[in-house]
């Protein structure tokens, strides 16, 4: 059986909890699940904390709600197969001749 990434297990842990959890609790539950093999080092909590911090940036899977406390990002909280959404592009106003730069002759 192939092991899952710590990130995916953390997402599942937070989804099952249904509430924000502290980094220590997330780490404990990820290790107890036995589904992730990437946390066998000396500092698994630091590894999970770094993963959560990076994942809490815009477009990430996590959302920081307090110091060391995270929940799922809004787009992941509701569904098991949600993918991060791309922000919609805003239409740019078209340039008109009034906005265009006027050319002048230097010799005039």
Image (cartoon, rainbow, N blue to C red):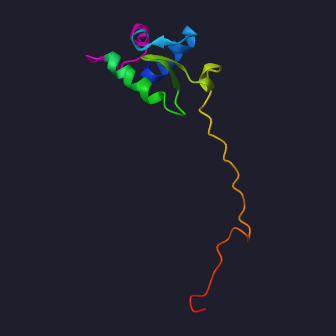
Residue 17 image position (x, y, % from top left) = 55, 8
Q: Nearer the viewer, residue 76 or 66?
A: 66
Is 91 drawn above or below residue 81 in the view shown?
below
The residue depicted at 42 percent of the width and 26 percent of the height is 53
Magenta span covers which residues? 26-43
Quadrant of res 45: top left
Is 94 drawn above or below residue 65 in the view shown?
below
- Residue 37 part of the magenta segment: yes
If the image is split into quadrants, where does the C terminus sit? bottom right
Is 88 drawn above or below residue 49 in the view shown?
below
Residue 74 image position (x, y, % from top left) = 61, 24
The count of marks equals 0
The residue depicted at 34 percent of the width and 22 percent of the height is 47
Q: Nearer the viewer, residue 15 or 38?
A: 15
Residue 100 image position (x, y, % from top left) = 67, 71
> In this rendering, would 21 be left or right of 40?
right
If the image is split into quadrants, where does the N terminus sit? top left
Is 62 drawn above or below residue 24 in the view shown?
below
Quadrant of res 103: bottom right
- Residue 63 part of the magenta segment: no
């Amino acid at each position: 059986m192939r092991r899952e990434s710590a990130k995916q297990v953390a997402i599942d842990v937070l989804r099952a909890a249904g509430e924000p959890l502290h980094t220590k609790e997330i780490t404990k539950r990820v290790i107890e699940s036995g589904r992730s093999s990437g946390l066998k080092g000396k500092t698994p909590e630091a590894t999970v904390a770094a993963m959560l911090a990076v994942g809490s940036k815009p477009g990430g899977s996590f959302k920081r709600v307090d110091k060391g406390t995270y929940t799922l990002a809004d787009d992941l909280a509701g569904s098991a197969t949600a993918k991060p959404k791309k922000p919609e592009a805003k239409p740019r106003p078209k340039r008109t001749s009034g906005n265009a730069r006027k050319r002048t002759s230097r010799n005039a």
